[in-house]
């Protein structure tokens, strides 16, 4: 997957509906349901039908950087806009990006391991702030939110689909141990996740990309 070098202004790149995103190549990602056996909650294992998990099966990803910031635009079909918890089985929509923290061979299905941590950027539609959450995980059920997050998020829903953009400085030197450092001319493994709130998806119940993709940042 290519992360193109761009000269488009930042205020346009962070807008998920900006016409300029039409200039950025995209790649379709096949999504799958997270395995029920991998759910850390005994309640989820006992009450969820595995056939109903992972409603979103196709995700379009576009990536670009301007030498300072990286922008990742995720878009997917979703017939309903879910921004709040409205019932015991309806939750906010959301999406996330997963990266091995130190370039290791972290298992994507298990959110890393004790010896190979992963860094994830999470956005939920319930959030009013432009910031996305930055997290670290070392295996199933170990996700920890960091006190700071350099990740910005903007999202829009309409015509039965979500479009959202993650934006972050390529390097975040003050969080060397808490987030992946990026640079033009390098590559990083990346994975994706989507939560369909109207399908009762939250926490470990989601759609995800089953294999790491190589994201190459154009020099």
Image (cartoon, rainbow, N blue to C red):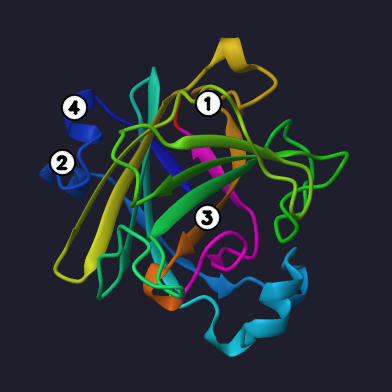
How many angstroms separate mark 4 from mark 2 (CA)?
A: 11 Å
Q: Earlier in the sequence, mark 4 or mark 2?
A: 4
How many angstroms separate mark 3 from mark 1 (CA)?
A: 22 Å
Mark 3 and mark 1 residues within 8 Å of each other at the beta carbon: no
Q: Which one is in front in this view, the residue at disc 4 or the one at disc 1?
A: 4
How many angstroms separate mark 4 from mark 1 (CA)?
A: 24 Å
Task: Name the residue rendered at 20%, 39% in the picture.
Answer: 15
Q: Could you say which quadrant of the image residue 118 lies in?
A: top right
Mark 4 and mark 3 residues within 8 Å of each other at the beta carbon: no
Q: Is residue 115 left or right of residue 96?
A: right
What's the magenta region?
200-217
Label 3: element kind: strand
Task: Tell me the residue that label 4 is attached to.
Answer: 11
Task: Name the residue rendered at 46%, 73% in the picture.
Answer: 88
What mark, if any, has residue 192 been given in the picture?
Answer: 3
How many angstroms separate mark 3 from mark 2 (CA)?
A: 23 Å
Residue 101 lies, in percent from the top left, at 69, 33
Q: Earlier in the sequence, mark 4 or mark 3?
A: 4
Whether residue 125 is in magenta: the answer is no
Q: Earlier in the sequence, mark 4 or mark 1?
A: 4
Q: Which one is in front in this view, the residue at disc 2 or the one at disc 1?
A: 2
Task: Tell me the residue that label 1 is attached to.
Answer: 185
Label 1: element kind: loop
Label 4: element kind: helix
Q: Quadrant of the C terminus?
A: top left
Label 2: element kind: helix
């Amino acid at each position: 997957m290519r992360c193109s070098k761009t000269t488009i202004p930042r205020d346009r790149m962070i807008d998920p509906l900006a016409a300029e995103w039409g200039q950025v190549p995209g790649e379709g990602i096949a999504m799958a349901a997270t395995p029920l056996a991998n759910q850390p909650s005994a309640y989820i294992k006992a009450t969820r039908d595995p056939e109903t998990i992972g409603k979103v099966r196709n995700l379009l990803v576009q990536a670009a950087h301007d030498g300072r910031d990286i922008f990742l635009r995720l878009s997917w079909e979703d017939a309903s806009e879910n921004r709040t918890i409205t019932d015991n089985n309806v939750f906010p929509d959301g999406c996330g990006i997963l990266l091995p923290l130190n370039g290791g061979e972290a298992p994507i299905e298990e959110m890393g391991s004790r010896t190979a941590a992963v860094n994830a950027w999470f956005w939920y539609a319930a959030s009013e702030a432009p910031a996305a959450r930055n997290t670290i995980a070392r295996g199933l059920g170990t996700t920890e939110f960091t006190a700071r997050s350099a990740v910005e998020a903007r999202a829009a829903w309409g015509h039965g689909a979500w479009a959202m953009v993650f934006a972050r400085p390529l390097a975040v030197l003050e969080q060397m141990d808490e987030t992946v450092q990026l640079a033009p001319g390098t590559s990083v493994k990346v994975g994706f996740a989507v939560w369909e709130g109207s399908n009762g998806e939250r926490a470990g119940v989601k759609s995800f990309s089953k294999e790491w993709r190589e994201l190459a940042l154009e020099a």
